[in-house]
Amino acid sequence: MKKIQSYQAAETAGILLNANENNLPMDERIHAAIMEKLQGAALNRYPDNDETELLQAYGNVIGVSPECILAGNGSDQMLGYLISTFLGKGKILYTLDPDFSMYDYYASSYEAEVKKFDVEEDGSFDIDAFIEQGRDASLVMFSNPNNPTGQCLSEETIEKILQGFSVPVVVDEAYIEFSGQESSIRLMDRCSNLYVTRTLSKAYGLAGLRVGFAVSCAENMKTLKQNFVPYTLNCLSMAAASAVLQFHDAIALNIQKIIAERERVCADLQKMDWLAVLPSKTNFVYCRSRHKEPFLQELKKQNILIRDYAGTDTFRISIGTEQENNAVLDAAHKLQREMER
């Protein structure tokens, strides 16, 4: 049996800037709406397998009919389901390097081969070369914005990729709300090979509920829904998520606060002589440094956890609260002063 690629889950103690969670406190109105919704949950009954209320609520947010949406246990389950649908032994998943490591995990679990296209150090890549190298792919999958580089492709570029492949193309939009760009969902009507995954774990601050979505044209989704495992989302997660989706304005304000903090953190880190910081369209920043280890040690002293890509000179820092971000910047400035001595 082919060895399955493992996935390292984030640690859960300390100042957690390692999993790209939304660290800002939840709006009191949203919290109250969730509590009210949960009080009416029928825990003695199986959840609504058609996910009626949730799909309608999310469809209203993204401007898509519920028949084009499928909800599941986080966008991870959606990614895994799409891989299980289109891949198998002898088939090829085509993605970027670096990109979200769960793609490797799911592909290897179905004994599929993973083929990768290397991006430049600044996160960019040649789109024409990407298309040409992936001619033998059975499924194309990549995150946009990219996790971990933070780069975001334009709608025009996404459309060019979709037109360059005849196989399904999955665009993982876990961080799209932080990008300031429109979702590629708008291409769905004219690109029948497009599948988009979304999540409420990041911008909506619901990582603990595990609610994610797959979006595609009605014809594609009809097949996906027929073969999807029943009762994948529990009634509490669906009820709470449906409540949160009614507060789009409050969520948008929260997103703007995170973006402002991201820009502040990036600008300050870019002043460090020992550190290269990529511009980000997400709620994290991706960095490269030959002095990574001393920085990690300094963060560890402050009980700050970030995502370290072992064996490389790169790491990723989630944007947290102002206080948490200041702690990271203080550690960076301390190392800067030590190096200037």
Image (cartoon, rainbow, N blue to C red):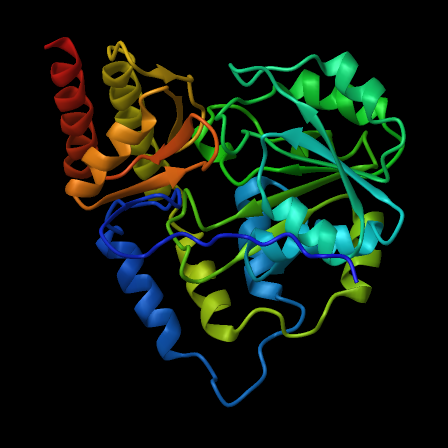
Residue located at (81% from left, 29% from top): 190
Check the image and report above or below for 38 versus 92. below
Percent position (x, y) of residue 99? 59, 34
Rendered residue at 54%/56% (across/down): 74
Nearest the viewer among 238 and 326 is 326
Q: How many marks?
A: 0
Query: What x and y, as percent, mark residue 246?
Result: 42, 52
Q: Image quadrant for the N terminus?
A: bottom right
Quarter assignment of residue 332: top left
Does residue 130 appear to the left or right of 315 in the view shown? right
Image coordinates for residue 91, horizontal then vertical, percent: 87, 45
Position of 238 relative to 256 (above/below): below
Q: Is residue 211 above or below residue 124?
A: below
Res. 262 in view: yes
262 sits to left or right of 340: right
Q: Position of residue 65 (x, y in %)?
A: 68, 48
Going by the image, does 216 lie left or right of 121? Answer: right
In this rendered view, identify the residue nearer to me: 93 or 76.
93
Residue positioned 45% across, 36% down in the render = 309
Look at the image and tell me whether residue 66 can be seen. no
Viewer-closest of 179 and 35:
179
Residue 153 sits in which quadrant?
A: top right
**Quick one: which residue is furthest to the bottom in this view?**
44
Q: Residue at x 80, y 20 (%)?
A: 131
Q: Quadrant of the C terminus?
A: top left
The image quadrant of residue 41 is bottom left
